[in-house]
Amino acid sequence: MNKIKLVIRGGFDGQTPVTQPPTFRLVEGWNEAELTAPAGILPAGLWGQVPAGDPYLLHANLLTTDIMNAQSSFDVRTGAPMQVRAQFTPYAGNTRLTLVRPSDALRIFTPPQALVKLEMLVESIGGTNELGSRLYQWAESTISRANSTGVRVAQVMANATLAAWTGVLHVIYNDNVAGSVNLPPLATVPTDAVMTFTRKGGGVPTILPAAGETFGAGVNVQAVTRSGILMNNSEQWVFAGS
């Protein structure tokens, strides 16, 4: 995020383009510059202070020595002739985010004031480690996490051996013939993984642990006539149901 602060004495006139870049210096975490000539229209690129060529989200607010005048305004303009795409009064408590394109111009107007400070927070949408790439990485991680720990459904039509799973797994046994469903080894299934097991067809399925493993009380086979929930308590399989 880029933090830019422009200081001007007398206020912004809303009509004079600022074509020459002012001199910036770091002040309390802000890239700050003082405008010594009349100013009212700024280029969207802010003289190289924002990532070149990328649209960005802008939060802007004005700080003045007097009470904020309702005539104060901040415009985002685009096109030729210029058309207003967004216009608002940038009070100190403003929470508005505005999309700015590289071809836009920013117009600021304030009635005459002894001292005016324009604070702008800029978050680029494109580029490495900017908002767009971070949103993409967040979405990718969310999808990956959902795929690895989300809810899945498995239809079993005959004898089967289940692979290890994470998150929630719904197993539906849908066969008119009795069959067996083999569980993966306990060590391969996280203790926060959950399985629901449901009988749908006419056949009664039987759940079998891996060799040497059991359900509670040393039971090594579990028939499912209706449905149940299966979990790993790190020592045995836990089954609750019927």
Image: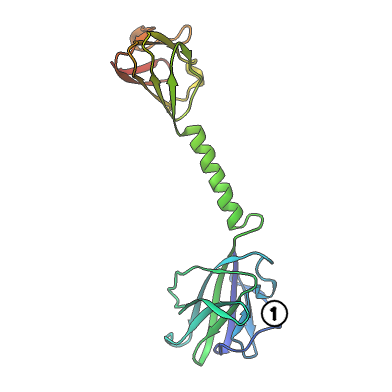
141 left or right of 71?
Answer: right
51 left or right of 217?
Answer: right
Q: Nearer the viewer, residue 22 or 51?
A: 51
Q: In this figure, what is the number of numbered marks? A: 1
Residue at image point 52% right, 40% down = 143
In the picture, the quarter occupied by the N terminus is bottom right
Question: Against 58, is 151 above or below?
Answer: above
Residue 175 position in % (x across, y down): 38, 14
Give the quarter of the image for residue 80: bottom right
Q: Nearer the viewer, residue 168 or 64?
A: 168
Q: Amino acid at mark 1?
A: Thr
Residue 192 position in % (x across, y down): 42, 28
Residue 49 position in % (x across, y down): 66, 71
In the picture, the quarter occupied by the C terminus is top left
Question: Against 226, is 40 above or below?
Answer: below
Question: Against 175, is 130 above or below?
Answer: below
